[in-house]
Image (cartoon, coloured by chain):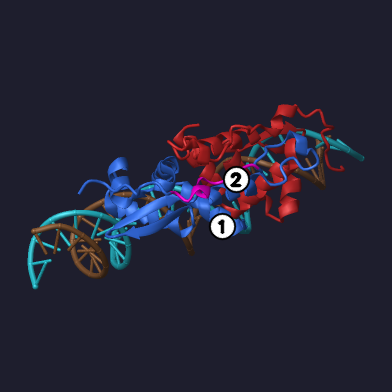
Chain colours: A blue, B red, C cyan, D brown
Amino acid sequence: MDQTTAIGMFESLSSPVRLDVYRLLVRRGPEGMVAGDISAALDLPPTNLSFHLKTLTRVGLLSVTQEGRYQRYRANIPLMAELIAYLTEECCAGHPELCVDVSALSGCVDADSDLPATRREP
Amino acid sequence: MDQTTAIGMFESLSSPVRLDVYRLLVRRGPEGMVAGDISAALDLPPTNLSFHLKTLTRVGLLSVTQEGRYQRYRANIPLMAELIAYLTEECCAGHPELCVDVSALSGCVDADSDLPATRREP
DNA sequence: ACAATATTTCAAGAGTTCTTGTAGTATTGA
DNA sequence: TCAATACTACAAGAACTCTTGAAATATTGT
């Protein structure tokens, strides 16, 4: 994790809309959500949501895959784990026994998700 | 952790100067640093540093105590742990076994720091 | 081919943040 | 008390972000 990446992630997460979107997708896990469903779930104009999804995707917090005319977005959990590690790096240097342990962080994404890719009703 | 607090923290951390300051103080642990030493360590004009320290303190990421004419700043590690928990809350709902475990997070601050409070040479 | 659906791009105004110098307040030491 | 030191408050311009509607692109189903 370099500083530029970390800054980009924090900037992304410092909008209420984007934080809501990101947390929603973290809860969803590997299944993710298509843009229209996010728009409906958070009651946002599609235009505005698109702007924020692009911002989150640009910095890597979300990944996006095309499914026909839908765009499915997923949270990039391992990147979040890297950010946390960056933030807590060398915490309390000289007294490591007092510090946050984030070494055990792993990602939802380990689990290649062979869940059925649910779409919404037509 | 409520959304407003989380947003404030992310906004604070999304400036290169503030992120550097915060990470420096995380590394320092309970000892913290006085403003002038931070200014020297990061080669920042005191005016500008003051602006950023105030921003970090306002949102709770730093705490500050007066020591004579010095202001000693410390990172608030437990709050960081709360933020991480907020971000990873209900990760992968329905498949918790795949998710980030942050429940073990604790703070540097558990250790009431009876280290000698080192000042710099007069 | 056509209409409907899903999503993105563009432009523009309102609001916010960052940096810097100058000036101010508070504490220390002689 | 006086000068030096440590730090903060203020002001103003430059730069950036957010929101919105209208228009564009791409995909699907008939």
Residue A105 rendering spot, x and y as whole percentages = 60, 43
Say whether residue A18 is visible. Answer: no
Please state which amino acid type lies under the numbered disc 1.
Thr
Asked whether B73 falls inside the magenta stretch, the response is no
Q: How many marks?
A: 2
Say whether residue A101 is visible. Answer: yes
Kindly identify the residue that appears in the image at 58 percent across and 45 percent down: A106
Specify the principal SS of the magenta part: loop
Q: Name the quadrant of the C terminus of chain B.
A: top right
Dot 2 crowding, Cα within 10 Å, few <14, some 14–19, many 20+: many
Residue sitting nearer the eye, B20 or A121: A121
Residue A1 rendering spot, x and y as whole percentages = 61, 56
Q: CA distance from mark 2 to mark 1?
A: 12 Å
Please state which amino acid type lies under the numbered disc 2.
Ile
Residue that numbered label 2 is attached to = A84
Residue A63 rendering spot, x and y as whole percentages = 44, 56
Give the secondary structure at mark 1.
helix
Residue that numbered label 1 is attached to = A5
